[in-house]
Image (cartoon, coloured by chain):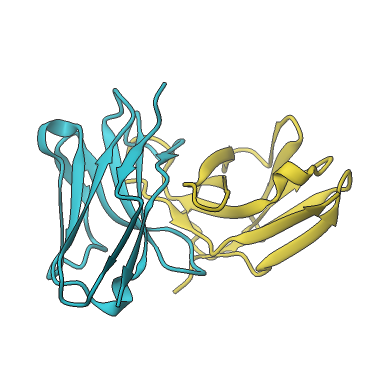
Amino acid sequence: EAGVAQSPRYKIIEKRQSVAFWCNPISGHATLYWYQQILGQGPKLLIQFQNNGVVDDSQLPKDRFSAERLKGVDSTLKIQPAKLEDSAVYLCASSRGQGAGEQYFGPGTRLTVT
Amino acid sequence: DQQVKQNSPSLSVQEGRISILNCDYTNSMFDYFLWYKKYPAEGPTFLISISSIKDKNEDGRFTVFLNKSAKHLSLHIVPSQPGDSAVYFCAASEGWDGGATNKLIFGTGTLLAVQP
């Protein structure tokens, strides 16, 4: 079974620029998550989708971050405009159901904002 | 407010000995706990979990212990192997299935180094 795919793996942008990340979850997984992991911290949930509907986006900075999951499969996370404090690893994860059971993580995208 | 705390940023043990990683939490509503392992440049990988109705769960060399009264859990690795060297994250949730969003709250991680 193929794992969670993410691209790009690395991205360097200047502040105030925009950036987008892509995630393809494990086939058949209904729930998709985007996490932000700042250096030295644990992953923090930004947004959770159940199929193509948003379940939780309470920690998503909606003035600059947006995410969508069209057709309930792939997802994109966008930052516009980026700030220096957005430098982090952005992790995508998926799970079969909505429960807090096992989540499968992708390799992440390391974003550096200069 | 850090609801899940891993107070040891790093731990070094000798191959073959026991590794004990600790985790404390403050939210009494948490009832499901997980450990994830992370290698550099990879995403976290699920290791083992425990629900609040149990105080111990074992899977091969890995055992998780839960002390609800102390709001403390620990991961024991016996015997430790060099391939176990990684960052270990403790995570907690208010519900393991159904219910709200059941989102995971992660600790800051402990870097385990197993010396050959």
The cyan chain is A
Task: Name the image quarter holding residue A81.
Answer: bottom left
| Quadrant location, the N terminus of chain B | bottom left
Residue A97 percent location from the top left of the image: 33, 31
Q: Colour of chain B?
A: yellow
B22 shown above or below A108 = below
Residue A57 placement, left or right of A70: right
From the viewer's side, name the closer residue of B28 and A90. A90
Q: Residue at x 74, y 56 (%)?
A: B113
Looking at the picture, tell me which residue is in the foreground, B37 or B1.
Answer: B37
Q: Where is residue A91 in the image (x, y as percent from the top left)?
A: 37, 51
Q: Can residue B100 be seen in this snapshot?
A: no
In this picture, is B62 found above or below B72? above
Q: For residue A32, say whether it is visible.
A: yes
Q: Nearer the viewer, residue A108 or B35?
A: A108
| Number of numbered callouts drawn | 0
The residue drawn where x is 55% and y is 45% is B34
